[in-house]
Amino acid sequence: MTYDKYGTSDTLSLNDVATPKVAPGTALIAVRRAGVNPVDWKVMAGGLDPMLDIVFPAIPGWDVAGVVEAVGPDTPEVSVGDRVAAYARKDVVAGGTYAEYVTVPVSAIAHIPDGVDDEQAAGLPLAGLTALRCLERLELSNQDTLLIHAASGGVGRIAAQLAVHTGATVIGTAGEQNHQRLREMGVTPVQYGDGLVERVKELAPYGVSAVADFVGGVLQDTLALMEPEPGSDRTRHVSIADPDVEEHDGALIWVRPDGERLRTLLEHIEAGQIVVDIDEVMPLSDAAKALERSREGRTRGKLVLDATR
């Protein structure tokens, strides 16, 4: 699936392109599944043009699960035939994962355990690595109370499960239709929107010790609920959507390709400690429809493209 100019999902079309060359330190992956993320349509609209060069026609997509088809020189980490997954973001927007084949640096590649299917593996990389980086920055323990803004979103659901696994008390904002799913994950749900501070303080009267923001526009609520660390003015909060957190002792998090950490996340799936909720698996040729559904927020989990049909 390619697009030859910035625009909406309507610019996507199914085309034949050359199979990518396999450079040293990379592997060619025969794509089985490609995960769909909001960043995909944002990149297509030019949202990251100030920081990433693009080569048209470009192929969208940064999440992949598939099988190693070929390897470049000096790639002892993988072999032809290995089942692998990757967060395949590169320095230039060009050859993405909405395709039959994609090349990926081996440093970004993780082997998929036998107990993890292609859909879960393809839906995990960007969201899972983002969630993991946020929680590593927050340094949670079983003494913490964590507030997650947008706990029912793609990143939020994984972060919530990882946070529960640390033993922390987790409160998550979501629409009422998603409250039961959060309860099943061990999260106490609260309705987002006006009155959030009061609703959270009914659950945590003295505030929370850490906040993860996966939606943006909630900084004032975060600051009103933060409890500084004992004996310190330091607060622990991160955001993937609001750079203003850096002016308030918070951290703006950008996910990085990282095969080692991705392997850890895949092992969490195999162990039953986290689940990637899959909304629908769609044919690769329906990529435009998938992106439009993502843009409209009409999903109850991850959308995944099947590159084999």
Image (cartoon, helix red, strand yellow):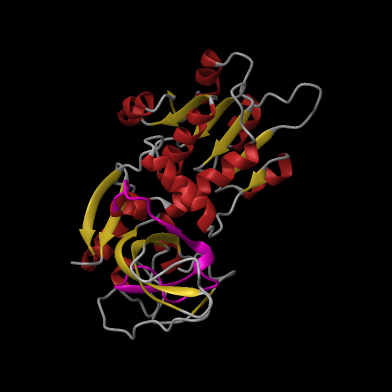
Residue lying furthest right: 231
- Asked if residue 263 shows in the view, the reply is yes
261 left or right, relative to 79: right
Q: Is 222 rendered above or below residue 300?
A: above
15 left or right, relative to 249: left
The structure residue drawn at horizontal position 31% and vertical position 84%, both measured from the top left corner, is 17
Assess whether residue 100 is covered by the magenta stretch. yes
The structure residue drawn at horizontal position 62% and vertical position 33%, both measured from the top left corner, is 220
87 left or right, relative to 228: left
Residue 178, how many percent across, how many down? 33, 31
The structure residue drawn at horizontal position 34% and vertical position 47%, both measured from the top left corner, is 297
Q: Is 189 rendered above or below residue 107?
A: above
Q: Quadrant of the C terminus?
A: bottom left
Residue closer to the observer: 124 or 174? 124
Residue 155, how many percent across, how many down? 45, 44
The structure residue drawn at horizontal position 61% and vertical position 37%, both measured from the top left corner, is 219
- Asked if residue 189 shows in the view, the reply is no
Residue lying furthest left: 309
Residue 144, how many percent across, how many down? 61, 24
Assess whether residue 301 is covered by the magenta stretch. no
Residue 294, how many percent across, how many down? 33, 53
Residue range (magenta) = 90-117
Residue lying furthest bottom: 18
Q: Quadrant of the N terminus?
A: bottom left
Count of numbered marks: 0
